[in-house]
Structure formats: structure tokens, C-alpha cells
Image (cartoon, helix red, strand yellow):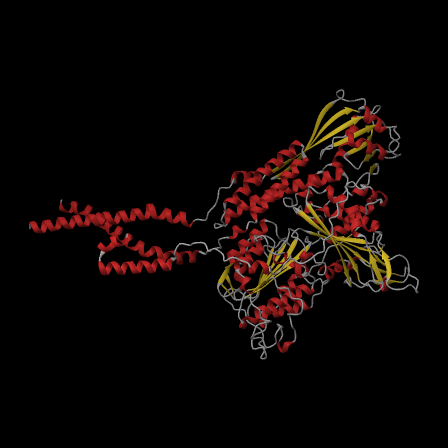
Amino acid sequence: MPDIFSLFQDQAEQFFKSGHTNNWAVLVCTSRFWFNYRHVANTLSVYRSVKRLGIPDSHIVLMLADDMACNPRNPKPATVFSHKNMELNVYGDDVEVDYRSYEVTVENFLRVLTGRIPPGTPRSKRLLSDDRSNILIYMTGHGGNGFLKFQDSEEITNVELADAFEQMWQKRRYNELLFIIDTCQGASMYERFYSPNIMALASSQVGEDSLSHQPDLGIGVHLMDRYTFYVLEFLEEIHPASQTNMNDLFQVCPKSLCVSTPGHRTDLFQRDPQNVLITDFFGSVRKVEITAETISLDPNLAAFESKPPKDELAAEPLKYAEQLPVAQIIHQKPKQKDWHPPGGFILGLWALIIMVFFKTYGIKHMKHIF
Amino acid sequence: MAAAAGAAAADEAEKARGRRAALSFAAIAVVLGLPLWWRTTETYRAALPYADIAALGELSFQLAAPVAVVFAPGSLPGDLPRPLPFRETQEEETLLNPRTSITSRYEMVYRSTTAQEEAALDAVTVQEADATLHPLQDASLGSLTVYVIPETSSLLPQGISVYVGKHRSALVRAGEGLAALRARLQQVTQIMSFTTSSITAALSDRVPASQLGPDARRHFKSSLGYEITFSLLNPDPKSHAVHWDIEGAVSHYVQPFLDKLSFMANFSVDSQILYYAVLGVTPRFDKESSSFLLSAHSLPHVINPVEARLGSSAASLYPVLNFLLYVPERSHSPLYIQDKDGALVGTNAFHSPRWGGIMVYNVEGPAPPQASLPLHVDVDMVRVMEVFLAQLRLLFGVSREVLPPEFLLESPGNEGLADWELDRLLWARTVENVATVSTTLTSLAQLLDKIGNIVIKDDVASEVYRAVAAVQSAMAELAAGRLHSAFQASKEAVTSSERAFFDPSLLHLLYFPDDQKFAIYIPLFLPMAVPILLSLAKIFREAKQRKKEPTKTD
């Protein structure tokens, strides 16, 4: 008997080396407008890789700030290409966008990360990670020294991002976190991180611009950014059982190909990047254990129930709730409008009239009003 | 001359009035304006019990379990310190780290049997004795009763000296004296209530990961509710028409288990049948046994392709446990699972931590070639539920310690969970809840310290007060040995603290960098401040000049 137990322990130890039991991904594209096609293509390419390596849609929060596939300016509707000559359509048939268009704001992004979501938000829009989750966060868009622009109207600063990660750490919402950013001056975004177990990669250093890769003359815009393009080429070689580690990901896109210098930060990470598998973050390899024991059940005892069976309600035929209560609408009485005090414009108008009156006729006529 | 003097005097008076005016402007700006601006622009923070929260950072758990030791006639050891009945307390303190310590206290009451208990112990089998003794015991959660029977008694089978029943009692064969009995008693009480390692596993947040075993990462964390989904996967409906009476099986075998756990969390159970759902892995054909085999290292890749079809994302916000029953295709039957050493797994099932379990159900025997397809298959729900219940227990953290060979543990049978296993779970969960609340509240206090512009509204503050009160009551109830109320208090504390920490209003104000703050305030304050400062400077210069003049005229 003890032998089997020790064998079981051995198996269990091996399977739990990296310490995580599930994977999540938060993929954010922050730019809108047709000429920022490449940012949506970046995000969708990473989404596609992550799904291919096994993370299910229920564990991916995809935020796209604009709709390129059904944009009126898209000459090939319902597609988003990442290679020129339309080689690879990353939009596919089963893209599940959780936050779309104007829902992609700094506030919503921070709410997703910290978990402070208003009640009633559907499950697909939440990051339900726990202390054994490895999270991949990918952000792309236009950025600068210390900020990232959202939707052309607001920014998220590196301090806010660092604070959000600290709040995640305090509540143990992640086991390890991989942060990848592909924007101009991307390295400035990870400068301020101070929570443990975070590894960060950026496409360019402070003072450098991240450049786009290739324009497509048929579609008329640049299709991808260089850094993400080469990361994608690298990820296409990975399959769920591969043993490639993070050091290889750091070598992707040297200065000769990328023009900017990609950077990375590993000082907050506890494990050596040599021992971190790519699939620890990009894939979802489940740990499994063989079930060795069973509980013996006695089918004959099942007849004696401690609880009396619930009374069956008379089965009513099921029908739909009334979608359009016509009777109610026809016989509706006009709604009593609440009285509101006169607003600013009316008050201003009256003030003007009264002032003009007194200017012309003098103050002694006040008694005619009151 | 007089006119000039008069003009000079009027001038002087004018200047004095000017000086007074400037000074009063400056005074009002500083005395009234600055505090008003500060109060209206500071973030609203309702009062929080910071001192109590800081005190929660240091957790010293006191776990008390009442144990009654009942001596049957003929089993009294000769060297008792006092005549029966008497009380004794055994305490043991473990320091996990400077901020966490566990003190386990067993309050033992030694007494002799009553007449009814003696009659019960005369039963033929030990299971009968256990059943008869059950109504005579203290049935409150967390309590234990140990019956000591004579060494020569035939109630326990040969070679067995300890029997642990389905409820909260154990039978121990009297040993060679009090010291041996005490050692035995300690073993039994530790198995049936808590051990240092089981409590340490519950404190995984506060204890470095190296001290924990794999158990700590397998079971689901304490949550307010769980969603359990049973799915039947039939990849080959043309060949197999599979029928399973899942409703009956759930109500007979799973529901008693969940009812026992009902006050721990809310459970909802659903089931579904998925057609044409294939495993992501192709099994290997083995010539010798003419069966198909799934090796252990391909098992992790089975789950991901199926997960997308399970619909767990549409379920509730509670953690979901998935139990899948896979009936292999006719062309891949029979299908067996191999473990790491190549041996066939008896249960033909495997489970994944914090996710659920999968069992492969092979259709009985080769069908005669002329049988009409699809074959009617009635799933043997008892076999299936035996495995699923075992997996369910593991996923909830009901695990057993390694036992010496002279111990006999009664299987919980159809109830799925022995009462003492429930107690073990509750001890661990209560400690886990208290640790979670402590972490949540101390991190909330730290965050408020570090990030200056988080708003605390009144309702959030009241939740925090409620959480602090509940956690203090939970610790007190634990020390008093009342497990039920301790657990309820800890659950309440967790609910309140999570509601306070994750309240959407805590994200109200975003970060304003310093240069933006200057950019907003300078156009407002600078035009007002410049005249005041300049006039104050002028007054100061004039005052200095006047001080010099009298010395000059001298």
C-alpha cells in the first residue's frame, strides 16, 4: 500500500513543476480608425496563436477598439489579414471579441485587471483568474514615454498599470504574469512595475519608435507591426508539447530586422527565464493525475432515501414570455411628466430681459413686478 | 507746507489702508481659501478600523476540539492518574512563520460507558456497533468520541487495533498502559480532526510554496458556490445509442454528498450530452490485448479541444467542476488508459486539478457482427458514480493521511462523505477563510496607503467593519471549539471582505500625474497669487526701509 502512495506523490510532484493550473490571456488593441489596421491585426494574430496552443475562449479577454473586418473601407469584408498578398486571414470563423469599439477604455481595462467589475457583467467579460493562473497580457497601439493612448482620447500611464498589477498581486489574482507591449517607446511602460512574478517584453526602448512591417497595396494600409510579425513567426513553430523557453523569445526580432531594439525585464520574476516554457504562458497544458481510488457504492441502498422526493409541479406547457405587450402599449395613458425647475437657459434669458427692462426704465418700476 | 504735510498725511493713511487691505487679502486666502481647497479636493475616505486590520496581520490560530474518551468495562489501564471521570487538555503550538502560528488544543474528557453504550458495544460486527452508538454521541461538528474496548475483545477483527467509523466515533483496542493509549489517541484524533500539515495546506497564501504538498494545488479554493456539470460525450452516435440515467444517479449518489456539504456552499448540478465530441488525441492500438491505449503523457492534451464545447463559460460565476464520461467510437473500442509505467488504470479515469475529471466507459463486449447499429447502451451508473464521487472528493480537498496497517477506516458508502471527513474539511476551510480575509483586509489597508486617490464610500467602510467583526468572532469560536459557528462567521467575513475589496467604486478616480496637476491649478491660482505676493513683498521692503530711517535721522 505505501508503495503506491509514494509513486503517486512522485507523479504529482513532476506534474506540478511550474506551479500553475490554468492560463488566461488579456489581449488589448487600443487604437481606432482604419489606418490603425495593423494594431487590430497584431492583436488578432496573438489571439489566434494563443487559441491554437490551447487556451479556450472562456479564458481569453479580447479587447478590440475598432472593427476592421466590417469597416466600410475594407475592400475584403469579414477578413483581417496579417501577411501581404492576403496569405493569412486572422479573423477566421470563431473570433470572440469581449470588449469592442467604445467599450475599450482605460477604466474598463483596469476594471478587468483588478476585478472591480459592476455586478451583472457577463462571465465572458471578466478575468476570473486565481492564485494559480498564469496570465498573458498583450497590448498594442500608439504609445509614448510612460503612456499608452486609448481610443485617441485618453491615456493610461505606466504608474496606473503598475498600481493595477500591484492590486492584482495583493489579491493573488495571478501566479505569474507575462506582459508584452508593441508600441513606440514600449519599454517605458514596464519601467515602473514593482510587483513580483512579472516578466515584461517590449518592442522598443525609450526614445525609439516601433515600426510597421509591410503595407498591402490591395488593402491600402500597413498590415502588421514588425515586432509582432516576428513574434508570430516564432510562435508558429511552437506546438502544445514543445519545450522552447523564454530566452528564445527574447532573441526574436533583433535590431537588424526590427530597426528598434526590443527590450525585456526579468528582475521581478522568480524563476530563471531558461526554465520558463513558452507554453507556460501562451498555451494551456493541463496537469492531470490518474484517479487511483474509488468510493464503493451500494446500489441496493439507493432505494431508501433520507429525503422525500420533491413534489412534481404540474407540468405546464412552456411558452415564450410576451415579447411585445401590444395591449399595454395601445392602452397606455400619456405619462405625467415630472415638473423640473427652469434650466439655465430660461433663467439666463429672463435675467437678460429683466436687466434690459430696468436699464431702460429705471429701478423704480420694480414695484410693478412684485 | 501745511497742504503738503496734509497731503503727505492723507497719502500715509492711504498707504496704511492699502497695506491693511493687502494683508487681509493674504490672510483670507491662506486661512479660508487653502483649507477650503484642500477639503474640497481630497478623496473621500470613510473611517476604517486600521488598528484592527493591522492586528489581523498576525494570525495565531487556536483550534480546539472536544474529545470524549469512553472506557468500556475491562479496558481501563491500571495507571490512570485520577479516577474517572476527569478532564485533560493537550496543547501543541506550531510556529509557521513570525506572523502565523497554530495552537491545537484537544480537550479530552475521560469517562466510563453508560449502560446503553455497553449494550451497543456488545454487537456482533463493528459496523453495527458504530451505527448503534451514533445516536448516543455528541453530534456537534468538530467533536469526537473514542471508545476504548478491551484488548481481548472480538469486536475488532484480528490485527486491527483502531476502527474509524462513518460518523464521529472511533473504536480503539486498549494497549499496554496509559502512555501507549495516549499515543494511539493522539493518532486517532489527528486523523479525524486536523493535523499541522492539513492546516498548513489551507494557509497556502502565507506559507512559502516549498512547504506545501501537491494536495494544496489540487483542490478548489473556498468559494461561495460551485457549479457541477456532468457531460456524456458520444463521438459515434451512429454506432452507439447511449442512455444514462443521470438524474437518478445524481439524486441517489451525488445529492447526499452535496447535501452534507450544503451549508458550506451553494451547489448547482447540471448535465448534458455532447455528440460528435472527439478527444484531441488518437489512441494507439496494442496488438497483445487487442485494445486501444491512451498513454499518460498524452492525457494533458485531451482536455483542451473538448473544453470549448462544454459551455462552461455560459454557466454561473462560481467555479465549475466538469465531469466527462467518454464512450469511445466503435472503431476505437475498447479504450484503456495507461499510467506512467504502462500498467492499465483500474478506474479508466483521470482528473485535472481545479478542473474536473474524465472517465472512459467501454461498451461491454464485442457486439455480434449482425447486430443492428446503433447499439443500445445503458450506462452502469453505479460504476461511473463510484469514480466521479472519488474525483469529486479529491477536488474538494477530502484527502486521507497515510495510515499504519492496524487502522481500519470505514468507507463512507452511499453518503459519500464521513462526518469526520466533513469536520476535517471544515477545519481547513475555516482557517483558509480567516487567512483570506486577513490578506484581503491588510492588502486593502496597504493599497489605501500606497495609492492616494482611492475613494472609500460609507457602504464599503461598513462592509469592512462587518468583516473585521466576523473574523474576530470566527477566531473566538475556533478557540472555543464550536466549529459550526466558527465556519459560519468565517464565511460571512469572506463575503463582506470580498464585497468591500472588489466594490466597483474603488476605481473611481484615476491617477493624475504631477505635471497634469500643476497644469490644472496654475491658471487658477497664479493670477490670484501674484498680486498678493507682490504687495506682501512691497510691504516687507517698506517696513525694512522704515526701520533703517530712524537710525539715519539720528
B229 in relation to B177, above or below: below
Residue drawn at x 87%, y 35% as measured from the top left: B159
Q: Is residue B93 left or right of residue A222?
A: right
Residue at the limit of the structure toward the front, as seen here: A331
Residue drawn at x 49%, y 56% as measured from the top left: A335
B75 in relation to B61, above or below: above
How far from the left and from the top, in percent, is residue B109?
73, 26
How far from the left and from the top, in percent, is residue A235?
66, 67
Q: Nearer the viewer, residue B181 or A333?
A: A333
Would residue A124 be seen by someone viewing this image from the given angle? yes
Residue drawn at x 64%, y 76% as measured from the top left: A86
How many numbered discs sit on the rendered protein? 0
Would residue A8 be seen by someone viewing this image from the given angle? no
Residue at the limit of the structure toward the bottom, as seen here: A217
Residue at the limit of the structure toward the top, as seen here: B83
Q: Nearer the viewer, residue B198 or A252?
A: B198
B24 in relation to B124, above or below: below
Residue drawn at x 81%, y 45% as measured from the top left: A295
How far from the left and from the top, in percent, is residue B231?
76, 56
Q: Quadrant of the N terminus of chain A?
A: top right
Residue A186 quadrant: bottom right
Residue A72 quadrant: bottom right
How far from the left and from the top, in percent, is residue A5?
80, 46
Q: Nearer the viewer, residue B483 or B512?
A: B483
